Image (cartoon, rainbow, N blue to C red):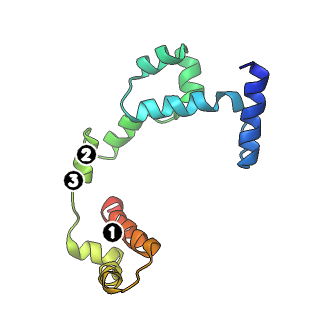
Amino acid sequence: MTYRAHCDATVAAFSALGLHLKAKMHAARGSGSRMAERVGATVSQIRRLGRWNACVMEGDYLPAMPRDAMHSLAGLAPDRRSRAALVPPNNLQRDVFPYVKTYLAAYVKQSAPHVSTGAFLNLLLYLLIAVL
């Protein structure tokens, strides 16, 4: 594929979605480097993969704030799973979404429940734990 064909296809895709980016041809490089960082790739591994020097990579492709440092300053454990394993007390859960369990019980008893209603209530139950 020629550069012009790739550029035209990329610009058309972003335009169809209503997205306005200044560096259209580098969008995949930036999102790829951020995804690699999220799943645990080191900065040196990402730099080697993209063949970037430190200035370019950290200035253009990675978030400005280092994720692990922000988590440690917030008092979170380095193991991200340990935070998700904590379940807040029931009284605190009831204070955040007081009626979600009542609505979920009523939803289960319906003869013809709407799928989207159940999905939304399950999302609220998930957020109850995730937010707290």
Q: Which one is in front in this view, the residue at disc 3 or the one at disc 1?
A: 1
Residue 115 versus residue 85: which sits nearer the camera?
A: 115
Q: Residue 63: image x %, image y %?
A: 52, 35
Image x and y of residue 22, in percent: 74, 34
Q: Residue at x 25, y 45 (%)?
A: 81
Indicate left or right for 14 with 116 as reference: right
Q: The N terminus appears in which quarter of the rendering?
A: top right
Residue highlighted by disc 2:
81
**Labels 1 and 2: the sequence-earlier one:** 2
Q: Nearer the viewer, residue 102 or 63?
A: 102
Which SS class for mark 1? helix
- Residue 22 visible in image: no
Task: Give the position of the C terminus as an image quadrant.
Answer: bottom left
Q: How many marks?
A: 3
Give the image quarter of residue 102: bottom left
**Dot 1 corresponds to which residue?**
125
Residue visible at 69% across and 28% down in the picture: 25
The alpha-carbon separation of the residues under discs 1 and 2 comes to 18 Å
- At a point 33% along the width and 68% down the height, the residue shown is 125
Q: Is residue 2 left or right of residue 50?
A: right
- Whole-angstrom CA distance, mark 3 to mark 1, is 15 Å
Q: What amino acid type is highlighted by mark number 1?
A: Leu
